[in-house]
Image: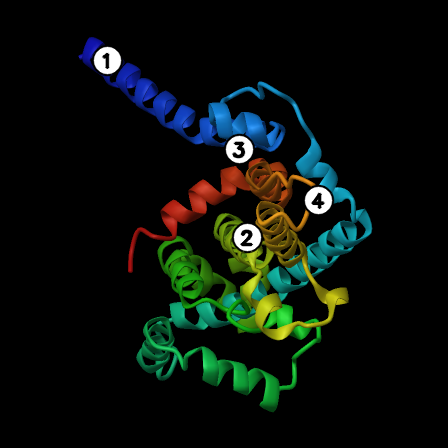
């Protein structure tokens, strides 16, 4: 029996090691390619280690360092503010749905689920946000549309509350005179750190990686976040490469390595912060999805 258990552990470790390699290798290739010269990438392809180190792509991207820094600051600010506000709204929606005594609980749950299946479409949404709410070229354009609340996050958090907060604890707090707000703040939230960290990370990733809101609702370059700035730089590089191919511009543009450098600069903050949230993320995403 012990030998069989040991064999299972060895097999599990081998499988997990292979999966880890499959996850790490693309990141190494990404970073290596971003530091490799364009002609080497075209001639020899991608590799784990840069064969001909060249930082031209980073020099082109960081040449306008003030705009890059401004984009990072806007992205950090919007991500922080959006995560806090969205997490608050999600919690205030999910907790009542987890209480069986809530009036019209089933209707509210159906209303939430309905929004996950249907929406008004891009044109009507654009007209609503720009003509009714007038958020165009404001910071609210980066915060509100499509990102402020997700039905999936609400359902996942509601499931966690239902499955992992004992009714006995809630009843005891009510006997001690705790109201619903006191109960939520002092009892439920301290017991829900894994799901809060998980949902917060998902929300933060959504805000950090978003570039559609900036594309649709922002024309003022002072409000561009890092994703919009990097996307515009990449499009400009493609245009310069086409012009060079047509003989209009003589300077070669490293579009392939530049794409890799754009991905590195966009993902770097997330790669640095994720290890600090990994413990809560794994627990929260697993426990929060046990029941429907």
Mark sitting earlier along the chain (1/4)? 1
Percent x, y for residue 165?
42, 56
Q: Quadrant of residue 111?
A: bottom left
Mark sitting earlier along the chain (2/1)? 1
Is mark 3 in CB contact (under 8 Å) with mark 2? no
Alpha-carbon span between mark 1 and mark 4: 50 Å
Alpha-carbon span between mark 4 and mark 3: 16 Å
Task: Write the residue at 55% across / 53% down.
Answer: 205
Percent x, y for residue 66?
82, 51
Task: Point out the residue furthest to the top here.
Answer: 3
Q: Nearer the viewer, residue 76 or 93?
A: 76
Relative height, residue 88 to residue 67 (above, below): below
Percent x, y for residue 12?
29, 22
Is mark 4 in CB contact (under 8 Å) with mark 2? no
Q: Which residue bears the numbered disc 1?
A: 7
Mark sitting earlier along the chain (4/3)? 3
Mark sitting earlier along the chain (3/2)? 3
Relative height, residue 287 to residue 179 (above, below): above
- Can residue 158 be seen at all in this image of the molecule? yes
Where is the N terminus found, in terms of image quarters? top left
Q: Which residue bears the numbered disc 2?
A: 205
SS class of the residue under badge 2? helix
Q: Nearer the viewer, residue 66 or 10?
A: 66
Mark 1 surroundings within 10 Å by alpha-carbon count, few (fewer than 14), some (14 through 19), many (20 or more):
few
Is mark 1 in CB contact (under 8 Å) with mark 4? no
The label number, if any, that marks residue 61 in the structure image: 4
Q: Nearer the viewer, residue 190 or 223?
A: 223
Q: Which residue bears the numbered disc 3?
A: 30
């Amino acid at each position: 029996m012990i030998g069989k258990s040991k064999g299972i552990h060895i097999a599990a470790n081998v499988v997990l090691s292979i999966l880890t390699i499959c996850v790490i290798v693309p990141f190494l290739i990404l970073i290596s390619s971003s530091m490799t010269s364009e002609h080497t990438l075209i001639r020899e392809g991608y590799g784990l280690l840069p064969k001909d180190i060249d930082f031209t792509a980073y020099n082109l991207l960081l040449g306008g360092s003030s705009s890059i820094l401004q984009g990072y600051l806007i992205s950090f600010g919007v991500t922080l503010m959006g995560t806090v506000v969205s997490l608050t709204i999600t919690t205030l929606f999910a907790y009542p749905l987890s209480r069986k005594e809530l009036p019209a609980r089933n209707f509210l749950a159906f209303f939430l689920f309905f929004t996950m299946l249907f929406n008004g479409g891009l044109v009507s949404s654009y007209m609503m946000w720009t003509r009714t709410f007038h958020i165009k070229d404001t910071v609210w354009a980066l915060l509100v549309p499509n990102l402020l609340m997700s039905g999936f996050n609400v359902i996942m958090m509601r499931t966690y509350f239902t499955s992992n907060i004992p009714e006995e604890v809630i009843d005891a707090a009510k006997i001690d005179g705790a109201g619903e707000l006191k109960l939520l703040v002092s009892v439920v939230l301290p017991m829900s750190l894994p799901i809060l960290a998980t949902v917060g990370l998902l929300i933060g990733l959504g805000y950090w990686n978003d570039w559609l809101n900036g594309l649709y609702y922002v024309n003022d370059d002072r409000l561009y976040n890092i994703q919009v700035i990097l996307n515009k730089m990449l499009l400009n590089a493609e245009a310069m490469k086409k012009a060079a191919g047509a003989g209009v511009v003589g300077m070669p543009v490293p579009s392939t390595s530049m794409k890799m450098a754009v991905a590195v600069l966009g993902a770097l903050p997330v790669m640095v912060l994720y290890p600090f949230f990994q413990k809560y993320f794994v627990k929260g995403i697993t426990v929060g999805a046990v029941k429907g």
